[in-house]
Amino acid sequence: MPDDDDPLVIATSGNLILDIAQEENGQRYSYRVDSKTLQQNSRYFENLLSDRFREGQQLSAALEALRLSGYSDIAEVSSEVLPHIEIINVGRIAISKTSAIQNLLADFLRAVHGVDLATPNPPVANLANLAVVADRFDAVACLSKYAQRRKYMQLADVKIKGKPNPTLTEERIRQKLLVGLLFDHPPWVTRYSKQLIMRDSVQWRPGVEEDHTKALWWDLPQGIEDEMIQRREYILETINSLQAHFLKLYTSGERQCKLGYDTSLQCDSFQLGEMVRFFHKIDTVRLQGKIYDNTEPTYYLGGR
């Protein structure tokens, strides 16, 4: 590992030093990168390093000055004399250790440059954070192709294949869904959006306010969060209307068991009782007195 003051070399022939921090006055990490590769694979850097922005103009001027100073091969130029560009904010990531940000950014830049990551088979949490950084720097297309070529999502599934299937935490479900969305892996989008819709989310409870400081997977982009909320509501409305229909039918006084047997009335009573017991068991109805009980229904937590 390089010294703390030395840039981490991503591209040996890199012509630019990126100084990156998550926030103002925060810990900065430096990386030697190739500006052309960044521009080719990230729309953010394509714009930032163009002559339309001050950073791009300064980069061009600094590289021209190096050329005039007699440097014919940029790989021979030491990091001390290469131009620097400062970047603040790498996206809504979730990193427990500050030092881990350095490794995350290094892996992001490695992927952009098409070289191997530090970990050949990154865990889901790493993939999710990489997706967040890729989204921040508008390099999703590049990272998506990179992850698909190396089959990271398939390898993550192989890890758990044949093992007991413990209930995933909501955060892990959301991480996989975000990776599936941004890295274009439809199986994860289908599987984990369904799980979230069926299980409900702590984010969707009444009174919960949006927190834009939390990781991006807690507020899924591209309108997916609102779409899942709406789909869950449609499902619940359908279930509610079906049970209301049958309960109304069997309490209407009109006979439903119409086979002509003497026990038809008892059949209706039995069916009504079974329906009430079933709906009560799955917690979609409750028995409540109409005289004094004014208790408001609790939030539905079914489907878990």
Image: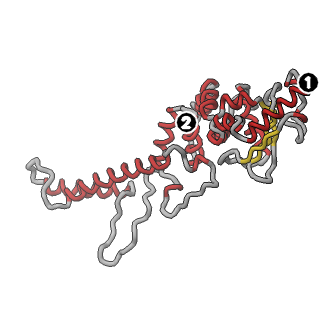
N-terminal of the two: label 1 or label 2? Answer: 1
User: Is residue 155 something that shows in the picture?
Assistant: no
Residue drawn at the location 59% of the way across and 57% of the way down: 211
What amino acid does circle 2 point to?
A: Gly
**Callout count:** 2
Rendered location of residue 164, percent (x, y): 57, 37
* Quarter of the N terminus within the rendering: top right
Specify the quadrant of the image occupied by residue 48: top right
Q: In terms of secondary structure, where does tag 1 sit?
A: loop
C-alpha separation, residue under disc 1 versus residue under disc 2: 48 Å
Q: Is residue 88 above or below residue 294?
A: above
Question: Decide: marks 1, 2 in contact (CB < 8 A)?
Answer: no
Residue furthest bottom as drawn: 292
Give the colour scheme of this rendering.
secondary structure
Rendered location of residue 175, percent (x, y): 59, 42
The answer to which of 236 and 273 lies nearer the viewer is 236
Q: Which residue is mark 1?
A: 70
Left or right of residue 254: residue 57: right
Using the image, tell me which numbered label, if any, was put on residue 103.
Answer: none
What amino acid does circle 1 point to?
A: Gly
Q: In terms of secondary structure, where does tag 2 sit?
A: helix
Residue drawn at the location 43% of the way across and 54% of the way down: 302
User: Is residue 105 something that shows in the picture?
Assistant: yes
Q: Residues within 10 Å of mark 2 (few under 14, many from 20)?
A: many
Using the image, tell me which numbered label, if any, was put on residue 180.
Answer: 2
Q: Is residue 136 above or below residue 255?
A: above
Residue drawn at the location 19% of the way across and 56% of the way down: 249
Q: Residues within 10 Å of mark 1 (few under 14, many from 20)?
A: few
The answer to which of 273 and 219 lies nearer the viewer is 219
Rendered location of residue 186, percent (x, y): 50, 32
